[in-house]
Image (cartoon, rainbow, N blue to C red):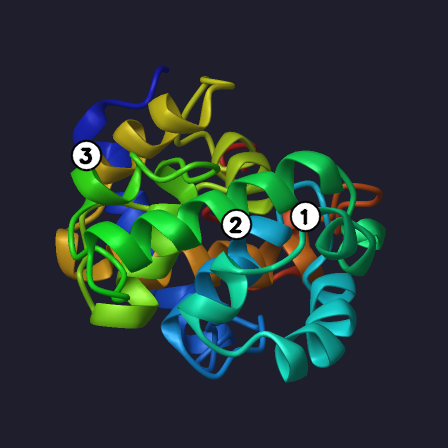
Amino acid sequence: MAESFQQKKERARKILQRLKKAYPNAKIVLNYKNNMQLLVAVILSAQCTDKKVNEVTEKLFQKYKTVDDFAMANLKVFEQEIRSTGFYHNKAKNIIAASKIIRDKFGGKLPHSMAEMIKLPGVGRKTANIVLGNAYNIIEGIAVDTHVRRVSRHLGFTKEQNPDKIEQDLMKLFNKKNWFVITYLFIEYGRKIHTAKKSIPCSLGPLKGLCHED
């Protein structure tokens, strides 16, 4: 029998409890020392592992520490400095352009709203959600990365492929107070249990009896 929305919502509540217990320290793993570096790290993480981003930014953030540093970066030099994160032409162009806007329009401070954040080059809802949540504790949605997308579909919370549509489905299922942590709990589950390469059966993981397939 098909699962009703209320049944799905109750299952989502139980899953949230289990994941919080399994991964009590779930949080962002990207390294940064200020909000501008946070934005840069998140932009670099697109189609790239957090581990690789941290390897690149360990040296990068010694050279570029402020909004001005990024805004005044030489494009060709910066491209080579972030080359190993992939898509480096677009990432470099967007980071420098975004830095100039933040410097000139926002007085050197990152915007405080989703509407303003997504106007920055290279910033979509996922990036904006991560940055707003970690920088200002402003929660306007749920960041949907590749892990969250995969896990959400695996758990039967969405049938969508588009991250923005997946986000809308998840926002309906979970209370707003949990939107921020959901991302990191799903990422932990996606890294440790339901990986892209090999998935551990639900019966052996922390969500035994609660997966869509059970």
Q: Is residue 15 above or below residue 11?
A: below
Q: Residue drawn at (25%, 66%), measured in percent from left and top? A: 109
Q: Earlier in the sequence, mark 3 or mark 1?
A: 1
Circle 2: element type: helix
C-alpha separation, residue under disc 1 versus residue under disc 2:
8 Å
Q: Is residue 118 above or below residue 139?
A: above
Amino acid beneath label 2: Ile
The quarter in which the C terminus is drawn is top right
Q: Residue drawn at (68%, 72%), measured in percent from left and top? A: 57
Mark 1: give few (<14), some (14-19) or many (20+) Cα within 10 Å.
some
Q: Which residue is mark 3?
A: 172
Front residue of this view, candidates 36 and 206: 36
| Dots 1, 2 in contact, CB < 8 A | yes
**Residue 207 visible here:** no
The quarter in which the N terminus is drawn is top left
Residue 116: name its quadrant: top left
Q: In this image, 61 relative to 22: left or right?
A: right
Q: Which residue is mark 2?
A: 96
Amino acid beneath label 1: Leu
Q: Position of residue 159 (x, y in %)?
A: 46, 18
Q: Is residue 12 above or below residue 58?
A: above
Residue 49: name its quadrant: bottom right
Q: Earlier in the sequence, mark 1 or mark 2?
A: 1
Front residue of this view, candidates 132 and 72: 72
Residue 75 is marked as 1
Labels 3, 2: front one: 2
Q: Earlier in the sequence, mark 3 or mark 2?
A: 2
Residue 64: name its quadrant: bottom right
